Amino acid sequence: MEKQTKEQRFRQALGDYAAEEVSDRRDLWPGITRRLQQRRHPAVLNLTMPMQRPRWSALAAVTAVLLILGLLSYVLPATLGNYLPHDNLISPARTYAATTVVTYEATAVVRTTTPLPDNPRRSGQANSPTLAIQPAARHALPITMIEPPTPLPQPLSP
Amino acid sequence: MDESEAISRLQQGDIGGLEGLVRLHQTKALRVAFLITRDHALAEDVVQSAFLRVYDRIQQFDATRPFAPWFMRCVANDALKSATRRARQLPLEGGDGVQSIELSSPDLGLDEIIESAEVSAAVAATLDRLPPAQRTALVMRYYLNMSDTEMSERLDCATGTVRWRLSVARQRMRQLLPAWLGGEEM
């Protein structure tokens, strides 16, 4: 009897303690329905996550910048083209032609001004301008028409 | 709405049946879960999950059998799992160095002591110092009035294991509540 009494006592104490700690007014139904809704509609979970919405002002600004750049790329070359003389434009072909002319002229000048000590007969022709190219004609002549300097005559053997 | 009607409605897909079951059994289920887990939030989570499992598997439930004992055993088992998981993360303090709880009024009668708040505090301290498995055995036996066989089936362990857990839990309680239980067998 005493053994049962102590067991009943403990049962009673355990029940009283549980009743003190957990009120019978606790309602779990709202939490359960919330979890049910989350399971039915997983997209609801996304509402708790930070969602980045498109910013229309930023999109409009980017569009405006692109339009301005496109307009400039169309208008600017035409505007600058009126002020830049075409003759002054440097092209690779013109650069090559000018360089070639200068090279031929320098070679010709050096070769024609070199004295020939052992040939007094030809020494009088050292300064002959036969190979010099006139400056006025250089512009008119294409590179293919400039002839290379003629080879110097070999000195006469004694 | 009684239990059988709630189960019948839930089996027909009526969510109101689940609400009826929740209203009928939530308080006791919460108390069972709290006694085992010793944590209000964890107990609520355990009981809510148990009701959601009922919602998922109500078609498999035999309506001729009583719902409450089966559901309480589920809640106790889930609470044990949650408490064990939490105990691994937060080791129980005290361990073997258990200190006896001195009741401040040993001259009072037992009935007066039981009714006093100190008994509740002593019971709480006792439960706190027991491992989850022994705590569950005590709750199943003395709060849910389950037999050794029922406990072994629910906890998926041998009957001898259940008896051993109960024996160890009683020994610990005699150490923790000497003035109340007086060392006699429960």
Image (cartoon, helix red, strand yellow):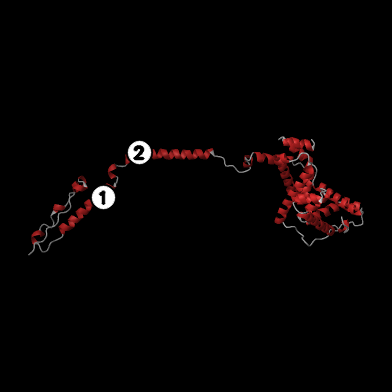
Q: Horizontal and vertical percent for residue A103?
A: 22, 54
Q: Are both tags, 2 and 1, on one chain?
A: yes
Label 1 crowd bin: few (<14), some (14–19), many (20+), radius 10 Å: few
For residue A82, side relative to residue B103 (left or right): left
Mark 2: few, some, or many residues within 10 Å (few <14, many ≥20)?
few
Q: Are marks 2 and 1 in contact (CB under 8 Å)?
A: no
The kind of residue tagged 2 is: Ala
Tag nearer the camera, 2 or 1: 1
Amino acid carrying label 1: it is Tyr
* Label 2, label 1: how far apart the Cα atoms are: 28 Å
**Residue A52 image point, x, y percent:** 57, 42
Q: Chain of mark 2?
A: A
- Quarter of the picture holding the N terminus of chain B: top right
Judge left or right: residue A2 versus residue A25. Answer: right
Mark 2 or mark 1, which has the lower sequence index? 2
Q: Is residue B39 visible?
A: no
The one of A111 and B10 positioned closer to us in this rendering:
B10
Confirm whether residue A40 shows in the render: yes
Disc 1: which residue: A96
Q: Chain of mark 1?
A: A
Residue A55's x, y, as percent?
54, 39
Which residue is at 20% across, 55% downward? Answer: A106
Element under label 1? helix
Please give the label number shown on residue A78: 2
Give me the residue at 15% from left, 53% from top.
A131
